[in-house]
Image (spheres, rainbow, N blue to C red):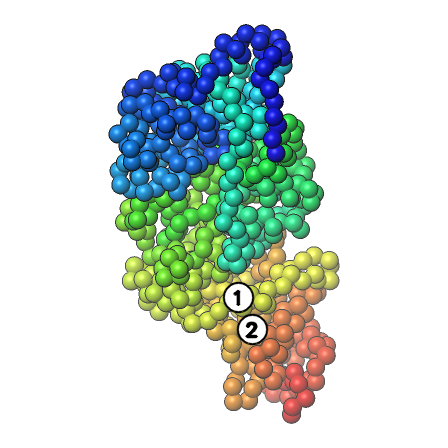
Amino acid sequence: MERVQSYEAKEAVAGGDEAAWRRKAVSPYQALAHIHPGDRVFIGSACGTPSRLVKALIECPVADVELVNLLMLGVAPSVKERLAGRYRFNAFFLSEGLRDAVREARADYTPISLSEIPGLFTSGRMPLDVALVQVSPPDAQGYMSLGVSVDITKSAAVSACRVIAEVNPNMPRTLGDGFLHIDSIDALVEGNASLPVLSSTGESEVARRIAMNAADLIDDGSTIQVGYGGIPDALLLYLRDKKDLGVHTEVVTEGVIDLIEAGVITGKRKTLNAGKVVASLAVGGARLWEAIHDNPLFEFRAVDYTNDPFVIAQNEKMVSINSALEVDLTGQVCADGTSAGFYSGIGGHLDFVRGASRSAGGKAIIVLKSTRDGESASRIVPSLQEGAGVTTPRGDIHYVVTEWGVADLYGKSIRERALALISIAHPAFRETLLQEAKNRRYLPPDQPELSLTATRYPEEFIRCVEIKDGSNVLIRPIRPTDEPAMRKLFHSFSSEYRFYRFFGYLSGPDPGKASKFVNIDYDGEMAFVAEEKRGDRKQFAGAACYSLDRDSGLAEAAIVVRDDEEGRGVGTALGAALIRAAEQRGVKGFVIYVRDTNTRAWRLVSGCGYPVTSKWEDGVYAMTMRLNDES
């Protein structure tokens, strides 16, 4: 997309003052006269990088200049060896071209949350002498749009002593709070280059699995913040069945356009800036630039608004999705660097975690691949590496998502966190992580290991089932992290009822037995829970399990349903799940022990559609259900 526009005879510019344009229009090399030795110079961000002005900095260097930037695309002047003595780069977020320079102390990294950077400029704590920005052509009133890069660029332009603007007809005119007037510009440089294109590496199979897990956490009507990269791109693909999503984000990508066109993103239920896609930065290519140009659906604001946790929290059901480099077993998240050195930056990570956490019905989600370095190392670690920074403290963490599942950590103990995180680590590293957790006393020495280290969680048995009253219940295999919820379920019954339903399985809810119940091998042992939402909370409506006798090929089975859930079809759904799992694993049938007064259980077993024989002894029926024709 190119919007070629002549800058000759601009009667419309600045209210008809053509002289204002001609007085300020200079070549990029003439513009450099505004930069003096010892200056601190800001360079516009990402796809808004003023490429012509950066090229002039490289070709006609100015001595002893500090260059400040959020995200640099292309070659930073300080990285070029011949310019190392003239420029020193100071970045708030490291692009690929700057990482090595920072690790070798040839450039600087300033760690700070993105929402707080504008305050550095406006307060004078980090005074700016010059701002180099890229803008759209001025309108009839003389206003030029910062387009795809409002972020910290607006604050830099307002705060700098001198502003040099590269005016490019290919820069989209975005609406919101990203305008500069021609009177505030000291020099104008004409440009016509296509904007830099920032494309992600694509969605891998691992990224798609992570995205699928994260998408399950997002409810209809949520307002979302999604970053940039393979996992966020994949996540947007898995949101196509959602309804009335809103967007309040730091960066907007082409995937958002797809969801707008599909009718998924409407913003109708947003409680702040209803109907608007709020962002500070756009990264992508021509299709995105065309979509956001002069489009009132999009509102571009500076990051001291978009990333302010108090603003973010005003969006009800706000969901933030941020990536990480590693997470330790207590829930500390590192996102900006490891022992190898600084990698990226704090960015808006903590801003959105805290904003979403304080939103009514909000969720803060951390996504990461379970391994790094070609699967030779785990990203879930016993403790963060030396030199790794804590981007999100353990007290702020909510959900962590890998390709192996979801760990819900908010308000959970260290023991519960360790179990949850080990369960979503790559299986190759779970045994080591479990032993490290025991060594650190995160877990008791007798913590069962089998279901965490030697088995695969059978995701294929997860199903959302509609029961008799029309509501939906999630039927899924049990996890080791379900122990607290299972104990709560068992505590809701009287001791007589527990025995009545479970007999030898779990006659009481003591920790040892509960731990054994949730730690199974998913082969000879299988257990399911029926999970449903009650308001903002999830609870178990019931549970079912079986244990196989390999000699006979029959499995002893039991089902328990909460008193207030009986008659809704929960037991039937759990029984169907047990049968489905048993048939796939070659179990010949079930033996179910039912008291002669338990007519509901008798009807449930007899009505499954399989041959059933029974034997009565001392008030208990031993009912044998055959899943095949073998006697």
Give the side of residue 194 with respect to residue 41, left or right: right
What's under tag 2, amino acid-wise? Cys
* Residue occupying the far bottom of the picture: 631
Q: Position of residue 47 (x, y in %)?
A: 50, 34
Q: Upstream in the sequence, badge 2 or badge 1?
A: 1
Give the side of residue 533 with respect to residue 23, left or right: right
- Near-viewer residue (440 or 120): 120
- Near-viewer residue (274 or 165): 165
Mark 2–mark 1 contact, CB under 8 Å? yes
Which residue is at a point 69% across and 45% down the rendered structure image?
A: 262
Q: Could you say which disc has been placed on residue 620 in the image? A: none
Which residue is at a point 51% across and 63% down the rendered structure image?
A: 486
What's under tag 1, amino acid-wise? Ile
Residue bearing mark 1: 478
- Near-viewer residue (449 or 198): 198
Please tell me whether mark 2 sits on a helix, a strand or a loop. Answer: strand
Q: Quadrant of residue 107?
A: top left
Density class for disc 1 (Cα within 10 Å; few <14, some 14-19, many ≥20) is many
Give the side of residue 499 with respect to residue 630, left or right: left
Q: Is residue 356 visible?
A: no
Q: Is residue 401 visible?
A: yes
Please tell me whether mark 1 sits on a helix, a strand or a loop. Answer: loop
Q: Could you say which disc has been placed on residue 545 in the image? A: 2
